[in-house]
Image (tube, rainbow, N blue to C red):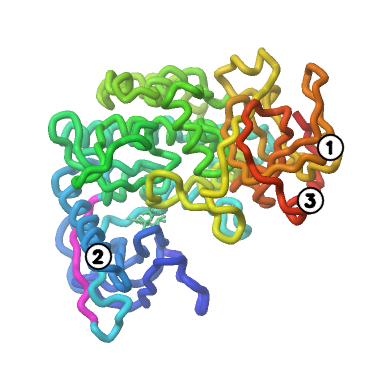
Amino acid sequence: MNDCPVPAAGRPLPDGAVAVPPGYRVGDWEVTGFLGAGGWGSVHLARRVGPVPDGEPAEAAVKFLSTTGLAPRQARALAETADREVAFSRATDHPHLIRVLGTEIVSDPDTPSLDGAIALIMELAERSLLDALGRSDQPGRDGVPDDVLSQDGEDPEPGLPEAGPLLIQIAEALAHLHASGWVHGDLKPANILLMADGTARLADFGLAARIEGTHGYAPPLGSPDYLPPERRTEQLSERGVMTRPGTDIWAFGITAHQLLTGGALPFGGGTPAARAAAVHEYGTGRGRLRLAAELPPAWHAVLIDCLAADPAERARHTMDTLLPRIRAAAAETAPAPRRVLRRGPWTVLGAVLLAGAVTAAWIAWPSGDAGTGPTVAATKPIRVYNMDGNCKDLTERVPACSLGLARDPHRKYAAGNVVSHRVWHDDVLLTDCVINDGDRVEDENGIGTPRWYRVWLDSIPEHYAWLPAVRTRDDPQAPVCPASATSPAPVSPTPAAAG
Ligand SMILES: Nc1ncnc2c1ncn2[C@@H]1O[C@H](COP(=O)(O)OP(=O)(O)OP(=O)(O)O)[C@@H](O)[C@H]1O
């Protein structure tokens, strides 16, 4: 961690991040740089001041959770989050869990943004899995280890070469903490840290819950892309929402699917809200699980069990019983020595993981894309329908069964007029309006309509695209779009086939 990024002078830190200048002292630690920011605070590199005790680290990561501007209830919740992190870390000790070294309450009346902040001192990692992958597409900041970059132009590998060993380590950590009576509650690539030796450690225990009997209670928070279907309907009591080891098993299934496929989330949809709706449909039996075609077959059965829609069905498996199967699948898909991976999939994985990295959102419908799209309240789910019977019954997302979304509904629905995001039968999208005078599109039975729905996607630069009405059986009663809505998104220089 020698070249940790320090925010450039004048560059604003992300919302909610606390600016902590280099040289700032907290307890035995002195801040030396900036590591990153999350939904709750900012994380800084720090070095120990004075002699380093035997067996203790000289450097650490310090997460500052600022209480400035918070209502007393929110400040209390934040303090509880920090307490949970420490209690969790004390109760659990494992080579694949980040160790919390201690906490400090900052007392600094001269610096109001820091006064009263909670400082969590943690073992230092190299980077998070999300950081490593998400930064790989930035020029001059190669987040991809050299040994996985192709020098010979081979076709890209679909998944992460080290996915198998990393997933074993993640599963071992989960098995250990479940056996110790805890649920992590917020497993996702952003919370999996990679150490200097390349091993993985789980971090971010702010939503960890103690299990009493079969379940425990956690705050009603989480990252929507990683929450199981039952979370949407779980009753909120004074103690929070019910959580079980199956919550982590589900999140493990989603994370594994991403690591093994180059970033694909198993539930389609252009935004976290649309994907949450798809998970909900799946949970109610109206939607189905479609694993990506690139997922190595050895992993299918494991992921199907991790992603069982019914929590009771999922509870038939524990991380302990899954571990031998995970090890077997990893052994079967172990990369050949010196396997290479070009930048492409890492870039895609980074982009998708970043898109899915919604931090600590309230459950129910996450809020809309402020500034770029409508609020979620103004959108309605719309499910994609593919007439082709062969495609309808597939349980994999094969490219031949994908459908295109148009950039401009008034131009011919054809190659060159579709966005990069493909959709499949049963995908749930979010629409906010409809037009009735677009290009007339006919379905396979020759029935045509000039009706198109505008759908919102966070994975494409254009933010929205158009679904021809023949590609859905839903009638979401969307209002007619204002004329300004149909100004076309820019045309892609690389034509893609419409579906
Ligand atoms: N122990 C650590 N060592 C090194 N870097 C860390 C450590 N913990 C966190 N980071 C870095 O700081 C960033 C922010 O971490 P933080 O836990 O605050 O947020 P997050 O997990 O990304 O999001 P959220 O907590 O909102 O879900 C991480 O993405 C990672 O890059």
Mark 1 lies on residue: 439
The stretch in magenta equals 99-108
In the foreground, 387 or 163? 387
- Residue 345 within the magenta-colored segment of the rendering: no
- What crowding class fits label 1: few (fewer than 14 Cα within 10 Å), some (14-19), or many (20 or more)? some
Which image quadrant is residue 476 in? top right
Residue located 27% across and 68% down the image: 71
**Vertical relation: 156 (above or below) 86:** above
Q: Badge 3: few (under 14), some or many (20 or more) residues near its Cα, within 10 Å?
A: some
Inspect the image, locate mark 1, and give the three-letter code of the amino acid beneath it: Asp
Foreground label between 1 and 3: 1
For the view shown, which residue lies furthest in the right direction? 412
How far apart marks 1 and 2 lie (CA) works out to 54 Å
Q: Position of residue 3 (x, y in %)?
A: 45, 64
Q: Residues within 10 Å of mark 2 (few under 14, many from 20)?
A: some
Residue 374, numbered circle: none
